[in-house]
Amino acid sequence: MPKVGGKRRKSRTHKEIEPEEEDPRCFVVRRGQAPKQIKQLVHDYREVMYPNTSMQLQDGEKTKIKDLIKAAQFYRIQHMVFMTSTKKNSYLRFIKNPRGPTFTFRIVSYSNSNETLNAQRKFKSFSRIFCPPLLIMNGFNQDVLFEDEKAPKPEHLKLVGSMIQGMFPVLKVNVAQFKTQKRAVLFVHKDDKIYMRHYHISYNIKGIDKKMKKIIKANKSLNLSNYNSFADYLQNANPQTDSEQSDLEEIEQVDQKDEKSKMSVRLHEVGPRLTLKLYKIEEGFLNGTVLYNRVVSKTKKAQEKLRKVQRRRILLRSQRREEQEQNVQKKQQQKQDIQQFDQKEKKVKQK
């Protein structure tokens, strides 16, 4: 310790902590009139994107895009997910904030999380977990052309894959521990459709009896009054049933520190389920040049005309903004001149 009254000098050295990259955040919002099923689907998709989204975001028919953009700037939101429904179809939009691009999908079929859990033979409820999900993707980098001319090309699928990949945080393999990963999201492109599934991950010790696993998980004292020994309990006790597991095979996970310990991984489907079909790709935020459209196909000349029209609109907007700024500056100068003139008159009257 230094002397009393003297300056304190730093004697210990601290390691500088490198700034971590922020996880991508998103808003999940419904727009326009929507049935109860779509409202529930919005809530379930927020559960998928949790904790990098707001669960209590208020949305309704009167919510404006301008308000969402302002809120996104304040909370550093990088992506937006819009869900809309019409009389014929329901649509899902992935948008990169603030300049785009915008990906529009038609929802072919869907099921809420309650429906997926009730469809299982052994119902099991899962609580909300404060950790981002693992992203699993397949079929977005294939250079395969479909027979249907309206189907998207490999270039468009790569854009969709990069968009979905940017919505989830990056997994750091050197730092991450497999036991801390509790959820997984699966996106698969197959037969011109995109399938989305949401799973809960559970880990079990492999090579141990089911009853012993149940005792380890319970972490409570046992009532052995009716048994002669612990071995008698393991032999004669009623077996416990396991939870519902997915059709996927078990995966062996070996810890690097302890090679003898092995864990089996099980995936429990939690929901929601989504089957999507790519409908449209726009360059901007809900507008701009159309890079892909399933229904309308335009020639290169028509696309060039649309680009010229959009450039003219941008130029007109910039000119109007400059004119408005100049008018505001003129008004401010006039006010200053009037104030100065009034002050001079007061001085003259006082004399």
Image (tube, rainbow, N blue to C red):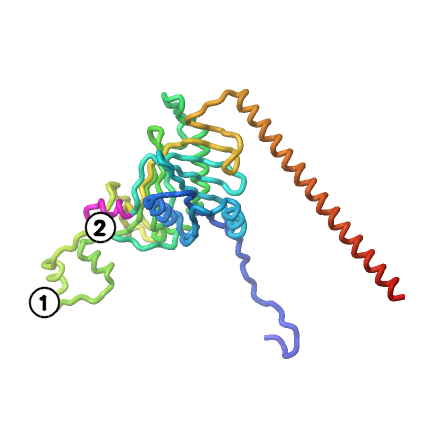
At horizontal 46% and vertical 47% (from top left) the residue drawn is 62
Disc 2 and disc 1: Cα gap in Å? 31 Å
For label 1, the SS is loop
Residue type, label 2: Phe
Q: Quadrant of residue 273?
A: top left
- In percent of width and height, residue 32 lies at 42, 43
- Residue bearing the label numbered 1: 226
Side of 231 relative to 15 (left or right): left
Residue type, label 1: Asn
At horizontal 30% and vertical 47% (from top left) the residue drawn is 113
Nearer to us in this view, 230 or 303: 303
The answer to whether residue 267 of the structure is visible from this angle is no
- In percent of width and height, residue 320 lies at 66, 38
Nearer to us in this view, 198 or 137: 198
- Residue bearing the label numbered 2: 123
Q: Which is nearer the N-term, disc 2 or disc 1?
A: 2
At horizontal 53% and vertical 30% (from top left) the residue drawn is 289
